[in-house]
Image: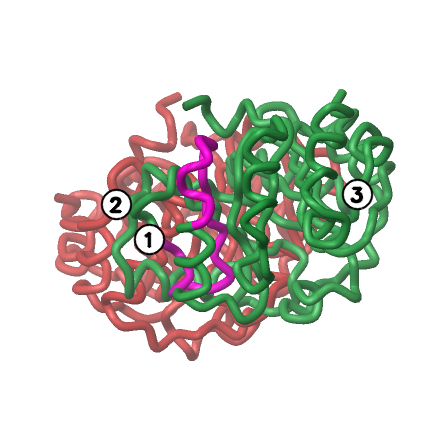
Chain colours: A red, B green
């Protein structure tokens, strides 16, 4: 299995949404590099298990990105992507839930990938939940990127526009200040053109909602457009 | 100059307090490994400069630990220790001030040492300023330590009892879960016995207030007691 660091295109699937079994085959053959199972709201262990069972044999690296401590799961997953929302205005989403998680759960650190998020769409569930300060200038967003890399040695800096297509200038500004930290972009990628725009700057683009809204064919189209 | 990682005993001097020139000689000959200039309140650039001028020629490694962005200073200092208060209940002390600092100041990252603090004395200025959640169990404190090391790769985990002598069981619990991250302990060390108790578990002990309250002779006594 190739390391997550080589992923250019990732498909994010939400355990709280309905995925048809025909879509699974299309996902498998799309050329996407990996699957991340992730949702902000109403992700139960049962829903996660059900989605895991549908996709576990597609032959792609599989990660889970928990929204809260009980959502982390190691068995069967190659990676657990753990976010810290750097522009949250609630401390629990930066350091609080993490300390609870460590205190109360068994963790296989060899599978954990730490993600520094900035959440930039104020209408998104994740922005509301975390009370994120979304009105960041280019310079402020880039400062969080530098902070994540230089101060915290985070492997991933994630620009998240969840639900809407974001400002590529912000992604560009972040890409210009990062060196070893990988830049992920997610939000609103639903066609090849948008995939190309963001993959010019991001190391890894994430396609999520479009799989449900436009069908899994969006994956091959966006994979092919990655620059 | 030996790396900060080898420091066992550090003297913390507050730019907002009066240091007599006779004390400077005693500090120089005490055997302490380094000086950190650091205060929580009312540290102006002028006060910092004046303390710097008093101690710059004592032949010890010199660090500054800013309480806010304008307090960082690189010229003349070997290190800038930059805290993030992991148990703060105000996001600015975890990620906010840092992003502002990066956006608005020139930073020499080769001098920056990132510190994950837990602040545990609720009566201290730093606990009040940062609204720190101080009532941590052994397990919760140790969880922050694991979080700092495994998730954020922090070089320093700092157990801060500023102004009072802390619970050595907490320091012990943190020391047991850390491997590469260095454990600093500060608070209430004013005699050899207390220095010995905490240096059994901490990689580095910090003596601060006692220099002002008992005189600089406390340094030699606490240096000699380091285990």
Outermost residue to the front: B22
Whether residues under marks 1 and 2 lie with C-beta atoms below 8 angstroms apart, the answer is yes
Dot 2 crowding, Cα within 10 Å, few <14, some 14–19, many 20+? some
Q: Position of residue A165 (x, y in %)?
A: 27, 68
Mark 1 vs mark 2: same chain? yes
Q: Looking at the figure, which quarter contains the C terminus of chain B? A: top right
Residue at 58% x, 29% y: name it. B29
**Quick one: label 1 or label 2, which is nearer the N terminus?**
1
Viewer-nearest of discs 2 and 3: 3
Residue at 18% x, 50% y: name it. A176
Which region shows up in magenta? B54-73
**What is the chain letter for disc 3?**
B
Q: Quadrant of residue A112?
A: top right
Circle 2 SS class: loop
Mark linked to residue A145? 1
Q: Is residue A160 above or below residue B147?
A: below
Q: Is residue B9 above or below residue A130?
A: above
Mark linked to residue B190? 3
Mark linked to residue B42? none
Residue A198 visible to the viewer: yes
Circle 3 SS class: loop
């Amino acid at each position: 299995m190739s390391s997550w660091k080589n992923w250019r295109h990732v498909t994010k699937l939400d355990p709280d949404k309905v995925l048809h079994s025909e879509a699974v085959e299309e996902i498998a053959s799309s050329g996407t590099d990996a699957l991340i199972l992730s949702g902000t709201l109403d992700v139960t262990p049962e829903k996660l298990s059900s989605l895991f069972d549908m996709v576990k044999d597609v032959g792609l690296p599989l990660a889970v990105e928990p929204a809260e401590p009980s959502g982390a799961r190691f068995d069967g997953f190659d990676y657990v992507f753990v976010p810290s929302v750097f522009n949250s205005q609630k401390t629990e989403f930066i350091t609080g839930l993490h300390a609870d998680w460590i205190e109360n759960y068994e963790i296989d650190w060899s599978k954990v990938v730490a993600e520094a998020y900035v959440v930039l769409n104020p209408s998104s569930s994740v922005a509301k939940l975390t009370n994120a300060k979304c009105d960041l200038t280019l310079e402020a967003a880039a400062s969080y990127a530098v902070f994540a890399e230089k101060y915290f040695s985070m492997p991933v800096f994630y620009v998240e526009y969840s639900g809407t297509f974001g400002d590529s200038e912000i992604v560009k500004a972040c890409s210009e200040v990062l060196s070893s930290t990988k830049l992920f972009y997610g939000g609103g990628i639903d066609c090849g053109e948008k995939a190309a725009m963001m993959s010019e700057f991001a190391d890894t683009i994430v396609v999520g909602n479009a799989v449900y809204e436009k069908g899994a064919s969006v994956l091959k189209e966006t994979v092919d457009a990655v620059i």
